Amino acid sequence: MGVSAVGLLAIGTAGLILDKNTHIWLEHHLTRLKTSIDPDTREWGWDLEAERWTGDPNQGGTDAGLTADGRKAVRDAWFSHHRPEKYGSLDENNAGVNMVDALLLRTEACLRSAIAIAEDPNIVPKLHPCTLTDLLARRAGILERLGGAHIDESKVQYERVWQLLERKGVQAARVALKLGDVNSRLGNDKALAWWTRAIELVSGDKFGTQLPTIPAAPPSGPAEQRLLASALVSISAFYAMRRQFDHARKIEEASLALLRSIRSPEALASTSPPQTLHFLTLLHRSALLSSHLAEVMYVQRLPVAECLKRLQAAATSSERVAYALVGISVRDSDQLTPSAKEPLLARYVDNPYLEKPASDLLRDARQSAAAAWNLMGELAERMDRQSALQYYTRAIGWAVADSTLRDDFTLISRNYTRIKQALEPLESK
């Protein structure tokens, strides 16, 4: 019995030491992340888009004023979100929930605990001004990803962040963009007013209206340019989904002209990874706007050839983004096979500020390329089934990416199979 007790005590002590050392490692990691940022990453504004886990944004780590329990809750949230396989099993309360949602729920619960401590009147005076704002924003983002019944609460948390940020600055513009997106998901027309606020903040203009207006010139800051481009894509989709096609087309055409006015480098090979990722992001947003415009033009009964031209531009631009992110040189993308499984270049993976936006962009570019080629196939099918087969073939090549939504892949696969089977009898003659 004595040996067993000693053994259990040793195991328990080892576990406590391991847990403590794990938390110490994370504090060093979060601190080093902030203090070792390279000038190019900062110049192109990628540090402004990074996850914030409380504390001085220039020093990193968790806020010492949050108490030991509060800091531990924040670190538990980080581990649950980033390294769940190394940090304990899932809570029994999450049984029956899919793995991704269960991990998000555990992360949200940890953040909720940290926020409760941060809101304690005795703790508030000890905190860095950014701490509560960062915690609320992180929780709002997790709730947004959970979707469904959590969207209303996400909106509430983003509104709190908006008030704390005093409605100014790049971070406030990002929150306004998020509020536009969550209101749109809730079917709320207030989304337009929030997107307008986001555009005003990044452009420095005051439009005197709650309806979105395209600025006369793009903002000079790269982070502001990316925010503007994302807002314009959201507005375009909003109007189209509500069948306000004239508004949608006006926004799309003006947005494309504005984004094209942003000077891009002559050769991406000569630019730094942060700069390259910036222009690839803008190129992808332009591709989405071109795709939206093609769909609106088709609904408005414009010539199919014009719609196909817009879709071709969208598909080619999306492909160029995807090829560039995996290091495939592009001269004529039509001569290259879809690259749906090539890994992201190390120059992005090795930069903690670029890895996530680059990974997300690669996923989105592959998905938008597949969608554009599939739409081209659907438009061309009645006129030229052989061309339609070529478009569907290219769509399914991009759609094999793991990130492609299952329903989208099923639709593309059915289109490809149907036209393939229809042409087989003709080919055998």
Image: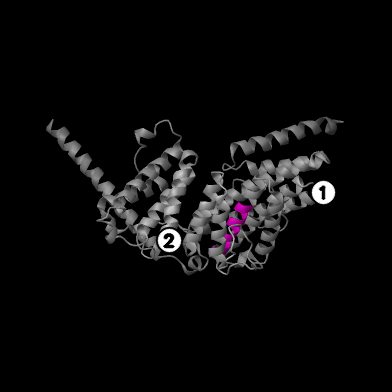
* CA gap, disc 2 and disc 1: 48 Å
User: Left or right: 220 with respect to 93?
Assistant: right
Residue type marked 1: Pro
**From what the image shows, is residue 191 above or below residue 392?**
below
Q: Nearer the viewer, residue 228 or 45?
A: 228
Toward the left, the furthest residue is 2
Disc 1 is placed on an element classified as loop
| Frontmost residue, 418 versus 167 | 167
Residue 16 in sight in this render: yes
Q: Which comes sooner in the sequence, label 2 or label 1?
A: 2
For residue 127, the mark is: none
Q: By what rule are the colours in the image chosen?
A: one colour
- Which quadrant is the C terminus positioned in? top right
Task: Answer left or right for 104 relative to 264.
Answer: left
Most common secondary structure along the magenta stretch: helix
Residue in the image at 52% along x and 57% along y: 348
> Which residue corresponds to the image point at 66% horizontal and 68% vertical from the top-left?
266
Q: Which mark is residue 165?
A: 2
Whether the residues at callouts 2 and 1 have beta carbons within 8 Å, the answer is: no
Q: Is residue 368 covered in magenta? A: no
> Which numbered mark, 2 or 1, is in the foreground of this view?
2
Q: Which mark is residue 303?
A: 1
Q: Quadrant of residue 284?
A: bottom right
Q: Which residues are magenta?
A: 223-235
Residue in the image at 75% along x and 40% along y? 378
- Residue 352, given in percent of the width and then of the height, sits at 46, 57
Question: Residue placed at 54% from the left, 60% from the top?
Answer: 197
Neighbor class of circle 1 (other Cα within 10 Å; few <14, some 14-19, many 20+) is few
Position of residue 355 relative to residue 1, above or below, is below
Measuring from the top left, give residue 39's x and y in whole percent: 47, 69
| SS assignment at label 2 | loop
Look at the image and say whether residue 229 sits in the magenta stretch: yes
